[in-house]
Image: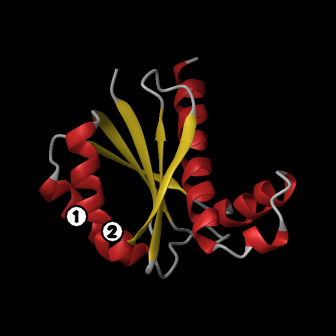
Amino acid sequence: MARILSIDYGAKRTGVAVTDTLQIIANSLATVATSELMKFLTDYFLKEQVETVVVGLPKQTDGKLSENASRVNAFVRKFKEKFPQITVVMHDERFTTVLAHQAIISGGVKKSARRDKTLADRVSAVIILQSYLEQTKYNKL
């Protein structure tokens, strides 16, 4: 079975997470400089089979799209042109950064390690992917 990959797209850095081959568990994969994201994905897709990419859709608390949404949508257009065989799903990413920081603190990560912003990017991508997996499973019931 092919993997599902998620992207927490940011202006400078992008968090990436991926499922196991059975599509049960979301795991952190990397934080990539956004300018290097397409190259990273191209290299990854050569090594691993990915059937779906879940991209976090940035929304404000009131449900309106945030200012980063235009950058995310531009990335998705380029992605679909380059990888037309891979399904792209936009998934609400509200509160993922807050949840990521809470998870990092709850996980006992030392304060000095919490300053590493790339960790929050990776954890946010995992939260987006796990949320997508749970929603998909719930919709099948």
* 84 left or right, relative to 91: left
Q: Nearer the viewer, residue 140 or 132?
A: 132
Q: Nearer the viewer, residue 37 or 76?
A: 37
The relative height of residue 21 versus residue 69 in the rendered view (above or below) is above
Is 11 in front, or is 43? 43
Residue at x 80% of width, y 59% of height: 109
Q: Amino acid at mark 1?
A: Arg
Residue positioned 29% across, 36% down in the render: 48
**How many numbered marks does the figure carry?**
2
> Is residue 9 rendered to the left or right of residue 39?
right
Position of the N terminus, as image quadrant, is: top left
* Residue linked to disc 2: 73
Viewer-closest of 76 and 44: 44
Task: Determine the secondary structure under disc 1.
Answer: helix
Where residue 123 sits: x, y (%)? 62, 55
Q: Is residue 137 left or right of residue 44?
A: right
Q: Residue at x 83, y 71 (%)?
A: 111
| Residue kind at label 2, given as amino acid type | Asn
Q: Residue furthest top?
A: 141
> Pointer 2 and pointer 1: residues touching (CB < 8 Å)?
yes
- Residue under pointer 1: 77
Picture coordinates of residue 101 (x, y %)?
75, 64
